[in-house]
Amino acid sequence: MEKIFNVRVRQINGGRVESEAHGQKIILSTNGNDPNLGITAPETVLAALGTCIVSNINKIASELGLKIDDVVITFEAKKRLDPLGIKDLYYTVKIQSPEPVEKLQTLYEMATTNGTATNALLEGIEPIGKLLINVASNAVQ
């Protein structure tokens, strides 16, 4: 059976949105120039990639019987202006583990090349969108 992802994003006040999936909510910023508002959309994409890699590491390590004590992923990227996007994306995966380096290298290679969010980014997913417009009842037509 195919897994379906359902996420709802709703504009709230003050330059923020509320993202919700399966009862969990995250408040995100719509203004990249004001870091006090929260994590921005590009930072959320990087966080999703990092979360996918950590998930992959834990799943694969379990399957291979490897002990992992801690995982920290750090991202650095620049904003591309034309067209808008992310460029020069670099990341570091720091694994704390008593396992041999060779096994951890294999784990790293597997975890960073195959995962749901990882593949979506690596393959350049192309979303299909549509616009729905609700006309306010007091609007002049």
Image (cartoon, helix red, strand yellow):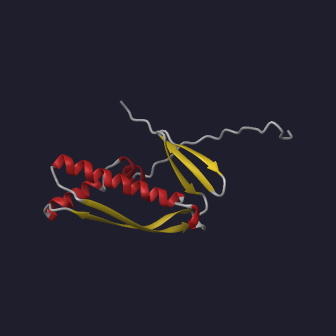
Number of numbered labels in the structure image: 0
Image side of residue 108 versus residue 37, left or right = left
Q: Residue at x 48, y 40 (%)?
A: 23
- Place of residue 50 in the rendered image (x, y in percent of width and height, measured from the top left): 37, 57
- Place of residue 4 in the rendered image (x, y in percent of width and height, measured from the top left): 43, 36
Image side of residue 137 versus residue 19, left or right = right
Image side of residue 108 versus residue 4, left or right = left
- Evaluate whether residue 25 shows in this view: yes
Q: Residue at x 29, y 60 (%)?
A: 71
- Evaluate whether residue 82 shows in this view: no
Q: Residue furthest right?
A: 140
Q: Residue furthest left?
A: 100
Q: Residue at x 64, y 50 (%)?
A: 12
Image quarter of residue 70: bottom left
- Place of residue 98 in the rendered image (x, y in percent of width and height, measured from the top left): 15, 62
Image side of residue 105 versus residue 56, left or right = left
Closer to the camera, 13 or 2?
Answer: 13
